[in-house]
Amino acid sequence: MSEPRPSDRHDASEPDDTFEEIVGEETQRDPDLAVIEAGSRTLRTYGGAPQADVVPARPADPETDKALRAVEQELAGRWGETKLEPSVTRIAALMDVLGEPQRAYPSIHITGTNGKTSTARMIEALLNAFELRTGRYTSPHVQSITERISLDGAPIAPERFIETYGDVKPYVEMVDAQQPYQLSFFEVLTGMAYVAFADAPVDVAVVEVGMGGTWDATNVIDSTVAVVTPISLDHTDRLGATPAEIAGEKSGIIKEGATVILAQQPVDAAQVMLKKAVEVDATVAREGMEFGVTSREVAVGGQLLTLRGLGGEYEEIFLPLYGAHQAHNAAVALAAVEAFFGIGAEQARSLDIDAIRKAFASVVSPGRLEVVRSSPTVVLDAAHNPAGARAAADGISEAFSFSRLIGVVGTSGDKDVRGLLEAFEPIFAEIVVTQNSTDRALDADELAAIAVEVFGDDRVQVEPRLDDALEAAITLAEEEDEYAGAGVLVTGSVITVGEARLLLGRG
């Protein structure tokens, strides 16, 4: 495994002096504008252009597309992700007959309510910057099922996805025959991910739980680093009615002797996590105590950060994502990678600053305050619970100067819809309610009834078809003068965002 390089002093010709030089040149302008301009220009110096779109389209080859659809159909015939029998018995049995592939590499395990996927992508980018081969497993997907399993920052090729399914299918059928319940959709995908990572092989896996922790299918790994992103109320029917109850379930990923990277949490949730850490002799690093965000400035295309890690301070980091929540995700990701390398506990040093800057400058997170169109500007965000909606509302208000914002909202039926709508009410001038194409979608008329109670009848429009809803919202935004700066935010569900992304030509 490659070792990270300790930070060295840079001479005056190196990139980290560029930021100050640019700011100095701009002293005759507003100082805040100078910082924003410096961030935009130093992005290219530190990391080059951000990664290309990492959401794959359908395979171009008709035979490959046909084979992928057949696999998708077989997987869809299993229990969906919302139907659970809380146990790791079946996935453990699958791992056993497969030869325990999940033990072939170290891993970083991520739980929490919001921010898991963005944090996983940041951790992956940081590890790649230190020349480690990574596997990343996240859920749900935005557009393509192959997004869930990534190797070295790119979704697994459809051909390899099909091949991996073919490899594990006989073992899946063997386990199915021995268990009271068949392996679920998510359990089979988890098994596929662990096999793909072992076959690659990867140096480290970055694994996001599907739901909860203790009985989540991913929890057959013994990670040396457990990451807990902010906990809030979601899936309360399965995980608990309070942050503390939910934390109890999520704390199940903390293994004996591990390092826990704990994002800012409600007090009762933090107490549960700390108690679990004591029980298993785990080390805890807390955001706001051992690490955190020292400063942040809005910049063109994202934000400029100073992060305090476990090994010291990291300045002038450009993150091409919007919102304070993404800055906090970045701090968590940095601490997780430092902990993986033993920094803070075993070693008192920092990671190479140029590698850190390059990694963060390359991060993309599709469907997270993602701009997919201009004139008018259309932004996508996969917020699906009140806490996520509040973060998205704060982020879009900070990063964009919309004179009027139109919301397009389609949610799932099992979410706190009223809480989500109330979070967006202060920033939406009008809302177009709709529904996505899945059977989990809340009926547009039911959603409209709740929206009218929150927004008032005169601010709500109903368009059951998502394409009609997008057209209606864009038309409303265009009613203002073209220079007035109205925008559209599509939100409410990862599925809604994924379908909108396709309709808007990003698939």
Image (spheres, rainbow, N blue to C red):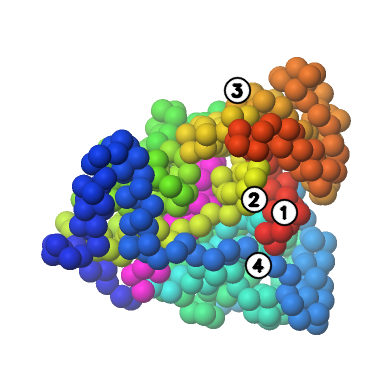
* Mark 2 → mark 1, Cα distance in angstroms: 8 Å
Q: Quadrant of residue 298?
A: top left
Residue drawn at x 73%, y 40% is 474
Element type at mark 3 = loop
Report if residue 96 is visible in the image: no
Q: Amino acid at mark 4?
A: Pro
Q: Which residue is mark 2?
A: 373
In the picture, measured across the screen, residue 49 lies left or right of residue 97, that is left
Instruction: Give the Cα separation between the discs numbered 4 and 1.
Output: 15 Å
Q: Amino acid at mark 3?
A: Pro
> Which quadrant: the C terminus?
bottom right
Within 10 Å of the Cα at label 3, are there few (<14), some (14-19), or many (20+) other Cα atoms? Answer: few
Check disc 4: other Cα within 10 Å, few if <14, some if 14-19, many if 20+. some
Q: First in sequence: mark 4 or mark 3?
A: 4
Task: Give the labeled residue for mark 3.
Answer: 426
Answer with mark 2 or mark 4, whichever residue precedes in sequence: 4
Q: Who comes first in sequence, dot 4 or dot 1?
A: 4
The residue pinned by badge 4 equals 56
Residue 413 lies, in percent from the top left, at: 77, 37
